[in-house]
Image (cartoon, grey):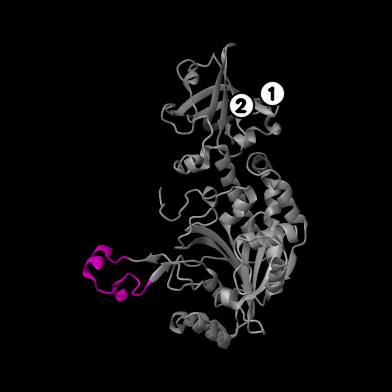
Amino acid sequence: MSWISVSAARDASAVGREVEVRGWVRTRRDSKAGFSFLELNDGSCLGNLQVVADASLANYADEIQKLTAGCSVVVRGDLVASPAAGQATEMRAGSLRLIGSCDAETYPLQKKRHTFEKLREWAHLRGRTNTFGAVMRVRSRICDSIHRYFQQQGFCYLHTPIITASDCEGAGELFRVTTLNLDQLTGSGRPVDHSQDFFGKPAYLTVSGQLEGETYASALSRIYTFGPTFRAENSNTSRHLAEFWMVEPEVAFFDLDDNRQLAESFLKRVLTDLLETCREDMEFFDRHIQAGLIERLTAVVQRPFEHMTYTEAIRVLEGAGEHFEYPVAWGTDLQAEHERYLTEKHVGGPLVLTDYPASIKPFYMRLSDDGQTVAGMDVLVPGVGEIIGGSQREERLEPLLARMAAAGLSESDYEWYLDLRRFGSVPHAGFGLGLERMVQYATGMANIRDVVPFPRYPGYAEF
């Protein structure tokens, strides 16, 4: 007898098969006619499989009628067409084996609704709820789509280091990695001798794999990185995490316009895959989390992305007649409220902004001929604002050295990076997409802490 998933068992094509399913009981309802209805879920899909357990089963009175939410079971039986609306199949149980009991008095996930904030306290169990099961399936599908897209486009998947000695963004928001005895250092009052540390120099958790990615793009032409990144940024907001995943493609012989087209193609492919393969979960989010979600995502897929420069965007915002919390002026970074106005009210769809002031962007972005702007870009989408950030990189040695000096970065720390400009330098470009931002956007979830299995943010590192 074959063991199949609940997802497979719910499909109409499975009618007539004798199978085994394994999962957790969601609900039990007893009938006076001498049988019980069990709702069984194994996480493979949103919906449950209805199991009809007859009183003739040997353990009906001792176990089946005592099953509670959270119990794990193995059920064998026949799949038949269900007379109930909304489900194609149900199982007539031939046998049911209890694997793990679950105390109804102490099990946190009772039938009543819990706030997402409360469920964060039970992050080890919240995956059993409809919402968080759906979030994780969508997250998994997005990851699969990311890999498929880049592999089909001829990109090489590159594993960049998690421990690094360089600060890609130059912002200093780094988690330090050390094996030194911090208690002794605190008591000694002496400056830290980094030569005694594990790596013999200061080391940090990476904020981005971009710089290392550039090295291999300069050899393999097309690469992408996809892994965890870390920011020691004291931001307690619904859009920031201290630990998150980033996908970062990097392509040799690319300019900013090539980069812009790649970002649009990539984003549309991921959303298309999601809408086609996660329909049940996406309909759940559309009904219960954010009304109109599917329509909004479909519009992003179908509409060409608009394009304007940062300078043009500032003019639009200055003439908008809107009251913004943060003042608008050339040379200041755009806030989420500005980005959302541009994409939701002015353009009414996806928008790519380019050519930002050099003063507000990292040192590695290519300086434009005007000496004031850089070849940077942000992709903005309705409902969120920025979802992708990228740039054409500075491939010329002298301008790069000048930008580094202005940022206060030491040449000696980046000699390896500068070598790329000394030995066969080429124009190249890339961008970064935060996975959690993408999942948040695709599901409509309000807080980014609810689209990652175990969130990390200031003051919180549980589990």
Residue contact between numbered discs 2 and 1, judged by CB atoms under 8 Å? yes
Residue 435 image offset from top left, x and y in percent: 57, 57
Q: Which mark is residue 50?
A: 2
Residue 192 image offset from top left, x and y in percent: 29, 73
Q: Nearer the viewer, residue 241 or 238?
A: 238
Quadrant assignment, res 180: bottom left
Query: Is 328 included in the stretch rendered in magenta?
Result: no
344 shown above or below 313: above
Dot 2: element: strand
Q: Amino acid at mark 2?
A: Gln
Residue 231 image offset from top left, x and y in percent: 47, 63
Q: Nearer the viewer, residue 94 or 63?
A: 63
Outermost residue, right side: 303
Query: Is 184 included in the stretch rendered in magenta?
Result: yes
Q: Nearer the viewer, residue 71 or 206?
A: 206
**How many marks are shown on the rendered structure?**
2
Q: Amino acid at mark 1?
A: Ala
Q: Quadrant of the N terminus?
A: top right
Q: Which residue is mark 1?
A: 84
Q: Is residue 56 left or right of residue 379?
A: left
Q: Nearer the viewer, residue 156 or 203?
A: 203
Magenta segment boundaries in residue numbering: 179-202
